[in-house]
Image (cartoon, helix red, strand yellow):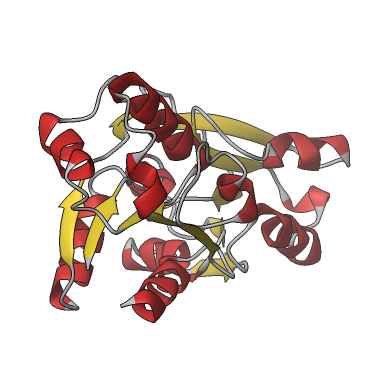
């Protein structure tokens, strides 16, 4: 089975290696390039992490290892632990469970919280917390820049029906991919491909008629790969 990965580096390389080890033929075409945003990191009693990029471009530069970490899921929690942080709480992979976790584990008087985020977010966690009395703010530490056009190699693969499944990890990636399809006149090509996405919100961004769309049960790569394995 031929699989197209749309997530940015460095996560894309990890996914490619994982799928190739499982026997898939994999082509990586990142819809975005992720880079650091120059930001002055202020100290906080607790940090909120909603992505691996938040760890790489933000938390990695926090020196107070006793600061409390609220991670969106187990993988971001593990990344924080690998950096030497001592007090880490892990949610269930989405912003709703993360907010519930913070409300359960943290009182407003315990100190300020900073969300180390990307330039684009699906949920403004710090604003929601501030609205109910917490001292919370957002610090943008990275941005994802859209790739204007796909590579010639990817266009050729789609035109020759060499891709069976496309994996989407974000709504932004779907929007960019939709633009590529329209630019290159590839609308008919997606009729023979399946889309596997990480959430219902991401699925709603898909344009055109796909052979099949499958939605992961949780915002976790393991769930996406589970669906992929069901197709192979």
User: Seen in the image, is 30 located left or right of residue 190?
Assistant: left
Reply above or below: 174 against 13. above
Reply above or below: 143 against 112. above
Q: Position of residue 12 (x, y in %)?
A: 25, 52
User: Seen in the image, is 224 located left or right of residue 217?
Assistant: left
For the C terminus, give its image quadrant.
bottom left
Q: What residue do we see at 67% from left, 40% from top?
A: 123
Considering depth in this image, is 201 or 79 the residue closer to the camera? 201
Reply above or below: 208 against 60. above
Considering depth in this image, is 125 or 8 the residue closer to the camera? 8
Q: Quadrant of residue 17?
A: bottom left
Q: What residue do we see at 18% from left, 39% from top?
A: 154
Q: Position of residue 62 (x, y in %)?
A: 40, 45
For the N terminus, give its image quadrant.
bottom left
Q: What residue do we see at 62% from left, 44% from top?
A: 204
User: Seen in the image, is 204 located left or right of residue 32?
Assistant: right
Q: Position of residue 111 (x, y in %)?
A: 71, 47
Considering depth in this image, is 156 or 96 the residue closer to the camera? 156
Extreme residue toward the left, this view: 153
Reply above or below: 104 against 64. below
């Amino acid at each position: 089975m031929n699989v197209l990965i749309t997530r940015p580096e460095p996560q894309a390389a990890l996914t490619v290696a994982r799928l190739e080890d499982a026997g898939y033929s994999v082509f990586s075409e990142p819809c975005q390039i992720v880079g650091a945003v120059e930001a002055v990191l202020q100290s906080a009693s607790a940090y909120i992490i909603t992505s691996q990029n938040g760890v790489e471009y933000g938390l990695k530069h926090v020196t107070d290892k006793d600061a409390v970490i609220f991670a969106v899921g187990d993988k971001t929690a593990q990344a924080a632990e690998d950096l030497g942080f001592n007090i880490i709480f892990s949610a269930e992979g989405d912003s709703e469970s993360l907010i519930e976790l913070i409300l359960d584990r943290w009182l407003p008087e315990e100190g300020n919280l900073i969300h180390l985020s990307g330039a684009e977010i699906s949920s403004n966690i710090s604003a929601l917390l501030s609205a109910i009395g917490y001292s919370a703010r957002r610090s943008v530490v990275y941005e994802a820049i859209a790739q204007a056009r796909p590579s010639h190699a990817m266009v050729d693969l789609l035109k020759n029906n060499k891709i069976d499944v496309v994996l989407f990890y974000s709504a932004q990636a779907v929007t960019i991919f939709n633009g590529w399809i329209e630019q290159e006149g590839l609308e008919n090509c997606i009729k023979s491909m399946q889309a596997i996405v990480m959430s219902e919100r991401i699925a709603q961004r898909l344009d055109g008629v796909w052979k099949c769309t499958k939605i992961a049960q949780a915002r976790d790569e393991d769930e996406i790969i589970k669906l992929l394995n069901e197709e192979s």
